[in-house]
Amino acid sequence: MAGAISSGPPTSTRTYQGLGQYLMLPSWVIIGFFLVLPVGMMLIYSFLTKEFRGGVIWEFSLSAYDQFFFDRGLFGDEPAKIEWTYITIFWRSIWQAALATVLCLIIGFPTAWFIATRSGRNKAILLFLITIPYWVNLLIRTISMKFLIRDTGPLNTWLIEFGLISEPLHMVNTNFAVQLGLFYSYLPFMVLPIYASVERYNNSLSEAAADLYASKFVILSKIVLPMVKPGIIAGCILVFVPSLGAFLAPDLLGGAKNFMIGSLIEEQFKGNAGNWPFGAAASMILLSMVLVVLLFYARAQDKGGQNHG
Amino acid sequence: MARKVDLKRFPGFQSMTYLCLILLYAPLLIVMVYSFNDSRSITSWGGISLRWYEDVFFGLEAEKFRAAAFNSVVIAIIAAITSTTIATMAATGMLRAGKFRGKSFSFALINLPLMVPEIVTAVATLIFFSAIGFNAGYLTILIAHIVFCIPFAYLPIAARMQGIEDIYEQAAQDLYATRFEAFKLILLPLMAPGILSGFLLAFIISLDDFIITNFVKGAGIETLPTAIFGAAKQGIKPNIMAISTLLLLVSVVFVTLSYLIGRMGQNKNGKQI
């Protein structure tokens, strides 16, 4: 996602003029046939009738979306009320993702700035240290976090040994644990794009401001932040979007009470619910939310481009 | 004029950086340390031993993990080779073939796997294979992996190609090389570090994938992440920590290699080109 966000359509030379479409053909076919077509198929499935224990009956139905938003009683004959179960799950996902984004920004921005302003070797080492967790298996990272914060895990053991608490803190299977997991999972996604922005920041702007008696706080808030805003927005999207559809953190660190969109969808296909059209509908709603965020981003980027030439 | 204050320094930023690194590494390091724990209970420390590594390779679940690791590696190798080839062609098309119809659309398409949330890709792929009556198995995992590896392979390859001017291919063509020869004898060798770097990243991304694999794998087929997930659902046992540590080290080695190869190529060619 990083590259998609940070680099626009590249410049081009013409050595292989006329061959462009042939060279693109494999990517068109593979991605078109195995991603675009499947998403279209998923849209169709969300309007079909469910078959019990997975699969669909090819009969048009709005019941998946209806079930998502309305409660018509056990037999479907009562007057429709708003169904809060799924809206609550989506709402929880949105605020968990938003909170993770804010926390990542609070830690990630100073980190990115600090790294980008180091010189030579130190910079390369620090940057590399941030990059490694970015590539390490998310499943293993989530399991590690769960091990650390278990009731009888190392964190509680140490806190008790140091006399800070007497009873172990119960953290696993809470919203807090899910939040910690999301924050921990996507922190590097915040640091890297902000770093790229700070790299391009021209420090003589700060010097000019300081010559005009601006305080450090003013320099940071009035000069630096607006200049590195593209990186901040990119970082926020890279944290928010995967957090919104996260499955591992809510599944391993949260319990049944801390369901997020990802776990809800998974349950329709792999779990006991077995309602494919409903899972497809929930996926479509998630995808639409992500598209809205990305469109908002594209618009913000266009505006930024006009302002800075 | 020498300044008294360093305008690049802001109070607290350094401590935030250390905090960030501690947060990122503490859980991983603790699991690594505890994977060498001799104690049968995962909470108390009983001295250093390799018994859980022995358990991973020769214990009761060894057969299961070995089969899963084999599947993971085979799928990752094929997916990485295929997606790197496709990505190299795509990068050549995007960066070396001038303007053509569908170019901006192509750029969006290549990055599409990164935009769509993983769980949505997983659902869509599962539905698609089920709708066309394609049995879930190794092939479904492989196809899904190739799709989402393409953008990851594309990034370092395109970055590298952008750094190579086309004067060398032009010169070759002036000396009557065909375009195919110019590609094979000039561009491809210059691109080698970028292609290798893309291959390694695609390999790691495929090896690590859990969510999509979990959806599209056939019954009874496990890759390493799905096997680890299944075992971890029943409780985090010490052998899970040992196998996690091993997988972690594989990732670190591959990413480090990818980084060094990418940089090495730049040092050698960056100044000349």
Image (tube, rainbow, N blue to C red):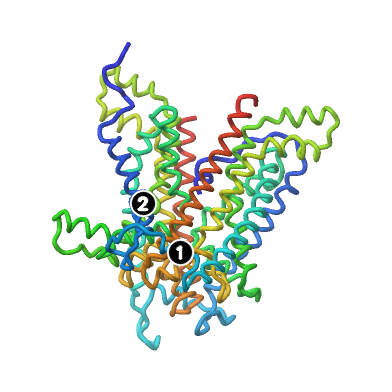
Figure check: A139 above or below A75: above
Q: Are marks 2 and 1 in contact (CB under 8 Å)?
A: no
User: Would residue A155 be visible to someone looking at this image?
Assistant: yes
> For residue A55, which quarter of the picture?
bottom right
Q: Residue at x 44, y 80 (%)?
A: A272
User: Would residue A31 be visible to someone looking at this image?
Assistant: no
Q: Could you tell me residue B102's position as x and y percent?
A: 68, 48
> For residue B238, which quarter of the picture?
bottom left
Q: Residue at x 47, y 70 (%)?
A: B59
Q: Secondary structure at mark 1?
A: helix
Figure check: B268 above or below A248: above
Residue type marked 1: Glu
Q: Could you tell me residue B69's position as x and y percent?
A: 55, 63
The subunit letter for the residue under badge 2 reads B
Residue type marked 2: Leu
Figure check: A11 above or below B206: above
Q: Could you tell me residue B23's position as x and y percent?
A: 32, 48
Q: Could you tell me residue B60's position as x and y percent?
A: 47, 73
* Callouts 2 and 1 in the same chain: yes
Q: Which mark is residue B29?
A: 2
The subunit letter for the residue under badge 1 reads B
Q: How many neighbours does mark 1 have within 10 angstroms: few (below 14), some (14-19), or many (20 or more)? A: few
Q: How many neighbours does mark 2 have within 10 angstroms: few (below 14), some (14-19), or many (20 or more)? A: some
Which is more toward the observer, B177 or B101?
B177
Identify the residue position indicated by label 1 in the image. Answer: B54
Q: Is residue B40 left or right of residue B70?
A: left
Q: Secondary structure at mark 2?
A: helix
Separation (CA) of disc 2 from disc 1: 20 Å
